[in-house]
Amino acid sequence: MFPHTIAAALVSFAGIQISLAQTTLNTLSRDVERVESVREVKDVQKSFAQLAQFGRWSDIAVLFSDNGTLQWGNAIANGPAAIKTWLQTDAGHMDGIRPGSLNTVVTECPLVTLSVDGLTAKGRWNGLRFQGDGQGGTWIQGGIYENEFVSTGDGWKISLLHYYPLYAGPYIGGWRNVGGNLSIVPYHFTPDSAGIPIPPPTGEILNNTATIDQLGHRITKLNDEDAVRNLQDAYGYYVDRRMWPDVVDLFIANSSVTISGVDSFNGATGVLSAMQQMGPENLTQGILNEHIVVDTIVSVDSSGIKAISRGIEIGMIGDANTRTASWEFNVFRNEFIKDIDGIWKFKALHITPLITANYSTGWGNGSLSPLPASIPDFISTSRTRSPIFSSNGTTTNTNTNITDLQRQLNRSAAYDGAENIASAYGYYADDLQSDQLGAIHAANGHKEVPFTGFYHSSTRIALACHTEYGYPNLTALRSGISFHWLMQPVILVSDDGRSANLRARLLQPSTYQEKAGTFEGGMYANQLVLENGVWKLWSTGIDEFYWESKDWASGWSGMDPRNESEVIAPSELSTKYPPDLSVKDLGSPREDGFMGGSGRYVQWPEIQRMWWPYRNLVSGRTPEWFWPGCVPCQMKMEWNLTSNGYLEPPNGPPLVGKGWSSVRCEGE
Ligand SMILES: *[C@@H]1O[C@H](CO)[C@@H](O)[C@H](O)[C@H]1NC(C)=O
Ligand SMILES: *[C@@H]1O[C@H](CO)[C@@H](O)[C@H](O)[C@H]1NC(C)=O
Ligand SMILES: *[C@@H]1O[C@H](CO)[C@@H](O)[C@H](O)[C@H]1NC(C)=O
Ligand SMILES: *[C@@H]1O[C@H](CO)[C@@H](O)[C@H](O)[C@H]1NC(C)=O
Ligand SMILES: *[C@@H]1O[C@H](CO)[C@@H](O)[C@H](O)[C@H]1NC(C)=O
Ligand SMILES: *[C@@H]1O[C@H](CO)[C@@H](O)[C@H](O)[C@H]1NC(C)=O
Ligand SMILES: *[C@@H]1O[C@H](CO)[C@@H](O)[C@H](O)[C@H]1NC(C)=O
Ligand SMILES: *[C@@H]1O[C@H](CO)[C@@H](O)[C@H](O)[C@H]1NC(C)=O
Ligand SMILES: *[C@@H]1O[C@H](CO)[C@@H](O)[C@H](O)[C@H]1NC(C)=O
Ligand SMILES: *[C@@H]1O[C@H](CO)[C@@H](O)[C@H](O)[C@H]1NC(C)=O
Ligand SMILES: *[C@@H]1O[C@H](CO)[C@@H](O)[C@H](O)[C@H]1NC(C)=O
Ligand SMILES: *[C@@H]1O[C@H](CO)[C@@H](O)[C@H](O)[C@H]1NC(C)=O
């Protein structure tokens, strides 16, 4: 990805000798810009979503290039002015402007690939849009974006926003497929190119004007952004499980929680009280407290010690015991601080509730809670590439070791490589693309098939998928799709940037021709590696389901407790094409309670215990159900990363003053 120019030694150009140091600096500068480009493309897409939520059509128009195009299904608009008009007309009264209206746009599962010249990019996202006019009208729509971007003098812009509608319908009655049976939305990537978000550049390297400490500062900012993003996403998971002590641990001592229109809370006891508004610590049978974190933009300020995250929180809440459930659409705009121990922490959590609605009736008539008094400020997507920091900043990068700066930069590039492949997994699984699912795994990687077990090697992974899905005619239309959204990732990258742990939420919307689709939820515990310059899945572990919906009308609170006398038959796949390690053999305690695993099958609305691949990212608190490393690795040691020439990524915070012996926590 970032070829070294060290071998070039002295480059002679037009009789002028350019020093090795300058050549290397030029390369580093270009590489930094390419990682920043991928991040900015993602932020532009998220800005589109965040601005749409409040009907900011003029601001959205500015996200497009002068000759940018929007194609929504078959409708086309060219140029910012026409795009603005189209979006406004299309939203109608469901514009997020009218009191009680809702227009929450979700774009997740980014798969972004930069062009070789670094001047254009393509990106795929899953989309969902929750709409209401406040006067009884509602609409839910879902589909896929295959967008194109261009680098301009004014930052990255959308040159083509192409949305493929796949499902849509009103709240009452739910959604169906759009246009009957569904075909595959063309991929802009292959299994290999998905694992190379930033391809090796060609052509002449521009002369860099940044100094080494300016580049170092920008690289540190990228690393910091990763840390803050992880913290934001990890927070969401603790909230889902009502793990209040872990939430409190994420905050510095002098912190605040503000829930607009409700209350403000200060300090550790305040954070706890704020959380307890959602209920007491831990989940009990039938309680769902999902707070899904989407559309997050993170901005680290020029001081390098303060950061903001802004995004959307979708609450899927309920109590199956009383058959009640509700929706929440909130905006968060949180503040973080890099503490004196060098660890990023929450400084202020600020939630602005937009709409709260009863599940049974939906949000058509607006919100059950007071409407927000103001719109939380947006974050600019521009990543100023020119020197922007003052040398008085407390965290000026003093690292002048270019190799080490490259390594630091590789760690942020790894974040995007890992995220791309997690997204690719979801897209290929949605479309039952067995060969591609094999090909995005490392040659010696392994993948779990839920209820069955683990298949070792990319070849056997593909065969297991073929055996399970059959050999569909891939161009044939399908009457239904269960989507695999791998979202809200916590990505912990190894020191050398060649391996990563990735935990992601599985959100599973489904759509059909004949009946309304639903939502289900699970969790992925994955590991990824850089194999021959391409990011691949090393380990895919899937824990499902933590919650399910009975059907659209009754939702997640409509599920009845499982009839214990029902016998769970072994999966067909386990006899047709036996795994290398069955979930039954992996057994207790890891597979206790999962279908096909060991022990009694625990099905929602009973609470299935959740495993954690990392310790608390701030305090290092070890969760009761801690499972570091790959899911089958305690039984199959030869499948672990260290046995295969990779570093085991961290499974907790950096160790500053914590007395741990190794930042990688090897052997834990
Ligand atoms: C859009 O404008 C860019 C220059 O800003 C140009 O390179 C490109 O060809 C144009 N695309 C179209 C479709 O006109
Ligand atoms: C909205 O309110 C109207 C009038 O009270 C009622 O008839 C209608 O059923 C409500 N619609 C929804 C979706 O709640
Ligand atoms: C880079 O700088 C060298 C030396 O000043 C100059 O000869 C060369 O043309 C420059 N290259 C580019 C791409 O501007
Ligand atoms: C705590 O933070 C608030 C606002 O950020 C500030 O006004 C106050 O002085 C701080 N208190 C201490 C003890 O640092
Ligand atoms: C919540 O669960 C954790 C982990 O299982 C346990 O240690 C803790 O005591 C529980 N807290 C309460 C209040 O039950
Ligand atoms: C939600 O709707 C159900 C059914 O109409 C009703 O029984 C329940 O009281 C409502 N809950 C709230 C919080 O309005
Ligand atoms: C920051 O450093 C600049 C010199 O680089 C100096 O002029 C300025 O006064 C400093 N500002 C503060 C607040 O220390
Ligand atoms: C520079 O960084 C690399 C990679 O971290 C390291 O191996 C090397 O020892 C460092 N060189 C110096 C002179 O510190
Ligand atoms: C950074 O990544 C590139 C591409 O994988 C690799 O060639 C290079 O050796 C790495 N540099 C360091 C210092 O780790
Ligand atoms: C697959 O389906 C397409 C469209 O229905 C058809 O044209 C094609 O012949 C089929 N291919 C095979 C191998 O059956
Ligand atoms: C839709 O797909 C189903 C199977 O997925 C198939 O049986 C049916 O014939 C298809 N209908 C059309 C119109 O293609
Ligand atoms: C990985 O497996 C090797 C044996 O192949 C073992 O020595 C090592 O401790 C394992 N590493 C971890 C992190 O479990």
Image: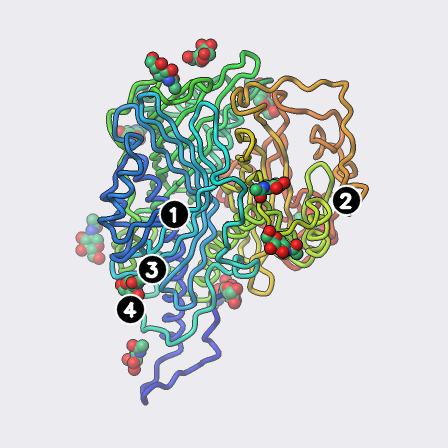
At label 1, the amino acid type is Asn
Q: Secondary structure at mark 4?
A: loop
Q: Earlier in the sequence, mark 2 or mark 1?
A: 1
Q: Earlier in the sequence, mark 3 or mark 2?
A: 3
Q: Is residue 17 above or below residue 521?
A: below
Q: Is mark 4 within 8 Å of ligand 3?
A: no
Label 1 packing within 10 angstroms: few (<14), some (14-19), many (20+): few
Task: Tell me if label 3 and label 1 are in contact, CB under 8 Å.
Answer: no
Q: Nearer the viewer, mark 4 or mark 1?
A: 1
Q: Earlier in the sequence, mark 4 or mark 1?
A: 1
Residue 200 or residue 142, whichever sits in front: 142
Work out how far the residue at label 3 is from the one at label 1, CA to CA, in angstroms: 23 Å
Q: Earlier in the sequence, mark 2 or mark 4?
A: 4
Task: Tell me if label 3 and label 2 are in contact, CB under 8 Å.
Answer: no
Residue that badge 4 annotates: 209
Q: Is mark 3 within 8 Å of ligand 1?
A: yes
Q: Nearer the viewer, mark 3 or mark 1?
A: 1
At label 2, the amino acid type is Leu
Label 2 packing within 10 angstroms: few (<14), some (14-19), many (20+): some
